[in-house]
Image: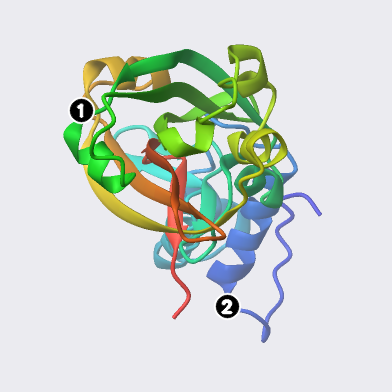
């Protein structure tokens, strides 16, 4: 059914819900693509013969769902799909994306030994370590940047093992590499989530303006013996990513 088929069901779901469902289906089907304008409230009034309040309610629903953004003087603009992650799930980025129907890829910006900040030493329970293996990667969903990640692997984990190469890091999940090469399996972890405005360098990497809102997830991953494996700080585009907490 086309979005502008004027037939609405009386006595069923509320009219605003029916219109929102039509527009939602059109967005999912690709009739409206990211950057396109949805019909205005006036056009919805004309097509469906509903009140302005009803038309506004349907657009409000799509905005709450993260499908559109309302811009003054412009209208309702379709945005890139938002990736939603349950906050109680421990998974790698690639597992997150595949679970939600997105294709994950990586672009390693740098990988090698670096001086470990004092705070990170304590988090990884390696207070005497002077250097550690640092990985700086761009995380992409469906070939579009969604996050920048800086991670440190605990020195004890890499002891006796050759660190991952850029090719290996670009090819897939770090968690899978740790398990297959180092024999270390990630079992649990702790996360701290905060809001932050993007600095210029990170904003450029993510393709947005400096000062854009972002979600910063700081994660400590632990192995089956409850020892630290990796400490990572992932900075997500606020318009492409959100967390869900089931209570």
Local packing at callout 1 (Cα closer than 10 Å; few below 14, some 14-19, many 20+) is: few
Residue 161 image-quadrant placement: top right
Residue 72 image-quadrant placement: top left
Q: Secondary structure at mark 1?
A: loop
For the C terminus, give its image quadrant. Answer: bottom left
Local packing at callout 2 (Cα closer than 10 Å; few below 14, some 14-19, many 20+) is: few
Q: Is residue 163 above or below residue 57?
A: above
Residue displayed at 66% across by 50% down: 100
Residue displayed at 51% across by 38% down: 157
Observer-nearest of 230 and 2: 230
Residue 9 pos. (x, y %): 71, 75
The label shown at residue 203 is none
Residue 236 pos. (x, y %): 40, 37
Observer-nearest of 43 and 227: 227
Residue 245 pos. (x, y %): 44, 69
Residue 190 pos. (x, y %): 38, 58
Residue displayed at 63% across by 37% down: 182
- Frontmost of labels 1 and 2 is 1
Residue denoted by label 2: 14
Question: In terms of sequence position, does the residue under pointer 1 or pointer 2 come before the other?
Answer: 2
Q: Secondary structure at mark 2?
A: loop
Q: Is residue 29 visible?
A: yes
Q: Is residue 92 above or below residue 6?
A: above
Q: Is residue 79 visible?
A: no
Residue denoted by label 1: 211
For the N terminus, give its image quadrant. Answer: bottom right
Rounded to the nearest angstrom, the CA distance separating label 1 from label 2 is 39 Å
């Amino acid at each position: 059914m086309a979005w502008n088929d004027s037939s609405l069901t009386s006595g069923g779901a509320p009219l605003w819900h029916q219109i929102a469902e039509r527009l939602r289906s059109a967005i999912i089907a690709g009739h409206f693509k990211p950057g396109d304008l949805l019909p205005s409230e006036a056009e919805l009034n004309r097509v469906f013969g509903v009140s302005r309040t009803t038309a506004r309610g349907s657009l409000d629903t799509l905005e709450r769902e993260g499908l559109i953004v309302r811009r003054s003087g412009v209208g309702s603009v379709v945005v890139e799909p938002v990736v939603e992650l349950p906050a109680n799930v421990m998974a790698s980025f690639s597992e997150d994306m595949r679970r939600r129907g997105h294709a994950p890829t990586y672009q390693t910006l740098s990988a090698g030994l670096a001086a470990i900040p004092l705070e990170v030493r304590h988090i990884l329970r390696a207070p005497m370590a002077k250097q550690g293996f640092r990985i700086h990667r761009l995380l992409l969903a469906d070939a579009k940047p969604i996050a920048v990640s800086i991670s440190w692997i605990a020195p004890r984990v890499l002891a006796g093992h050759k660190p991952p190469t850029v090719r290996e890091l670009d090819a897939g999940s770090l968690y899978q590499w740790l398990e297959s090469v180092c024999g270390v399996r990630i079992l649990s972890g702790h996360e701290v989530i905060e809001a932050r405005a993007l600095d210029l360098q990170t904003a450029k990497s993510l393709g947005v303006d400096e000062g854009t809102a972002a979600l910063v997830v700081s994660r400590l991953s632990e192995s089956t013996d409850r020892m630290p494996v990796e400490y990572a700080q992932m900075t997500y585009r606020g318009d492409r990513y959100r967390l869900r907490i089931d209570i």
